[in-house]
Amino acid sequence: MARKTTNRRNSYSKAKPKRSIFSRGIRFIMYTALLIILLGAIYHYRAGLAYYLGFKSGKVLEEDEVDKHLSDVRNIKVLENHKGKVIGIDVSEFQGTVDWDDVEILEEKYPVQFVFIRATAGNDRVDRQFKHNWEGAKENKIMRGAYHYYRPNENSIEQANLFIKTVKLQKGDLPPVLDIEKLPKNQSLDSLKKGLKRWLTKVESHYQVRPIIYTGESYYSDFLKEEFGEYLFWIANYNFYREKIEDDWLFWQFTEKASLPGVDHRVDVNIYNGDLQQLQFITVE
């Protein structure tokens, strides 16, 4: 009995190191894989990290300066990934008074070829810079379009009527845009969707061109993609890891923090998912 017990203990003690070696091997492989992924991410974003850590200037950067440099690094990377696509901006009164004579080249080599301009918001608000921006873009031969900021808790037909009263589209202008970013406070999602469809139908009937819908990527995926599939979408996504436009996005607003001659404040930059000839194809006839 004693010898059998001893033998069992000996066999157990001999088997245990084998399992321990196997476990250590698995952990080593996992840690190595994670390290490779981490090093790959660091290498991929090395320019941004260098800016962030102050390596480029040899000193610690101020917070705003770091933020600007990180944005610039990503913006250039995205632009380089979309050679052949059309680049544009969007503006509102929040950019102040734009000097349209100077709005021409982004990052010294990417021409600004279109602009979306905020015209109205809700059922009673006309953007204070709309007239200046609308006329300035036309005079400087930048393809222009107008958008309406939709307020979910206000009457959709009144909002559509304000936009129609304010915006006079001409041949060569881009289709009207409905900007929806917020969920309603006092109504259901079904009611919101009905209101959006009423605005879209009213505006399409007036201009005889189907509007574009602007929204964030998660809003698009969660609430709009299925029921509004007949419309074209302009999607906002500023995430540092996203570097290419999706196939089903007409426009991609990839940053809200770009610097551009002629604009005193940071400005949004957009990519059209095609070339200039294709963009001209969707304009008002």
Image: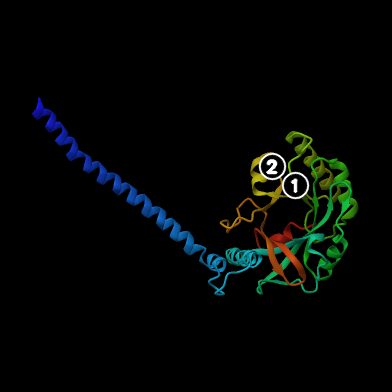
Q: Residue 193 sits in which quadrant? A: top right
Residue hosting label 1:
180
Query: Which of 82 and 94 lies nearest the eye of the viewer?
Result: 94
Q: Residue at x 72, y 69 (%)?
A: 260
Residue receiving disc 2? 224
Going 17% across and 40% down the picture, which residue do you hit? Answer: 14
Q: Is residue 285 visible?
A: no
The reply to whether discs 2 and 1 touch (Cβ–Cβ < 8 Å) is yes
User: Is 224 left or right of 41, judged from the image as shown?
Assistant: right
| Amino acid type assigned to the residue bearing label 2 in the image | Leu
Is 229 in front, or is 87? Answer: 87
Q: Residue furthest right?
A: 165
Label 2, label 1: how far apart the Cα atoms are? 10 Å
Residue nearer the viewer, 227 or 64: 64
Q: Nearer the viewer, mark 2 or mark 1?
A: 1
Residue 129 falls left or right of residue 250: right
Classed neighbour count for the residue bearing mark 1: other residues with Cα under 10 Å, few (<14), some (14–19), many (≥20):
some
**Kind of residue at badge 1:** Ile
Percent of width and height locating residue 84: 62, 66
The quadrant in which the N terminus is found is top left
Eyeballing the image, is 195 above or below 167? above
Locate residue 157, reporting x and y percent: 86, 42
Q: Quadrant of the C terminus?
A: bottom right
Q: Choose top left, top right, bottom left or bottom right for residue 167.
A: bottom right
Q: Is residue 64 visible?
A: yes
- Report the coloring of the rendering: rainbow
Element type at mark 1: loop
Picture coordinates of residue 272, whole percent (x, y): 67, 59
Image point (33%, 51%), residue name: 28
